[in-house]
Image (spheres, rainbow, N blue to C red):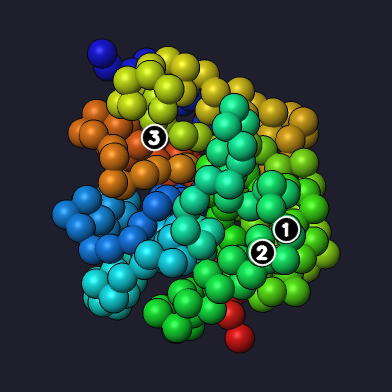
Amino acid sequence: MTPDWTNLDRELARWQEDGLILPLWWRDDDAIAATPQLDRLIEQSQQLALPAHLAVVGRDATSSLANRLAQVDTLVPVVHGWAHQNHAPHGEKKAEFGTHRPIDDVLEDAENALTRLRDLFGDRLRPMFVPPWNRIDAEVEPWLAGLGYSALSTFAPRRRAKAAPGLWQINTHLDPIDWKGTRSLVPPALLLSQLVTQLAARRKGQADVAEPYGILTHHLVQDDVTWTFCNDVIRRLLDGPGRAWVFDERIN
């Protein structure tokens, strides 16, 4: 079914009439190795001229991934936890960086991930922490800056610009995958309604208009229809008020 872009096009036109700019960024999660799926992500990123922030699992990242990223300039590696391992008890939502275990163990994993990926990617790695499943306990956040991180990225519009002193909050906002159902594309009408609602809230001053708007993808599991929708959305945003945004603070 062909998406109906009418309401989104109208909202984007309102943004342009008001002279507003939408910083647009892309985050893709769960990278470990060079794969054909990663090559597709690279191709799409190059065609769209929008770099993708590649959230890499610290413990399991391979040299093949580092070698592949060294060949391109449109993928920006960031930290996706340590092992992508659930430590929450049965019946609770999955989390690797909750308070289900001693906080010293949690922080050690976050530090080890940063250290290992810095060794693997060098100064290409950006000090952004992406907790698996987009979940992190509030008690953990204030410690991240001291470990060397300067940004935290989860999901949903942020409530404040900084999660903690020295730690920017830069979230994603649109996830196209129907994780609890088909694992294909969420019905486009629902996604577009969510997108228009979020953009309207920003335009009206009801949400943080300065926060980069984040598209969240998962290159290892996306099917053709999901890729097509993501590409079409990104193109429309960039043709309107959207401007490509990249997290540019590097590890010293």
Q: Which residue is mark 2?
A: 105
The quarter in which the C terminus is drawn is: bottom right
Q: In this rendering, would 22 be left or right of 232?
A: right
Residue 6 in sight from this viewpoint: no
State the CA–CA distance, disc 2 to disc 1: 5 Å
Task: Choose top left, top right, bottom left or bottom right for residue 225.
Answer: top left
State the CA–CA distance, disc 2 to disc 3: 40 Å
Amino acid type of the residue tagged 2 in the rendering: Asp
The extreme left residue here reads 36
Amino acid type of the residue tagged 1 in the rendering: Pro
Q: Which residue is mark 1?
A: 102
- Name which residue lies at 41% across and 78% down: 121
Task: Choose top left, top right, bottom left or bottom right for residue 33.
Answer: bottom left
Amino acid type of the residue tagged 3 in the rendering: Val
Q: Which residue is mark 3?
A: 233
Q: At which x and y percent is residue 130?
A: 56, 55
The quarter in which the N terminus is drawn is: top left
Q: Residue 101 versus residue 191: which sits nearer the camera?
A: 101
Q: In this rendering, would 4 be left or right of 104?
A: left
Q: Looking at the image, is 202 positioned above or below residue 246?
A: above
Q: Are marks 2 and 3 in contact (CB under 8 Å)?
A: no
At label 1, counting other C-alpha atoms closer than 10 Å, the crowd grade (few under 14, some 14-19, many 20 or more) is few
Give the number of the mark in front: 3 or 1.
Answer: 1
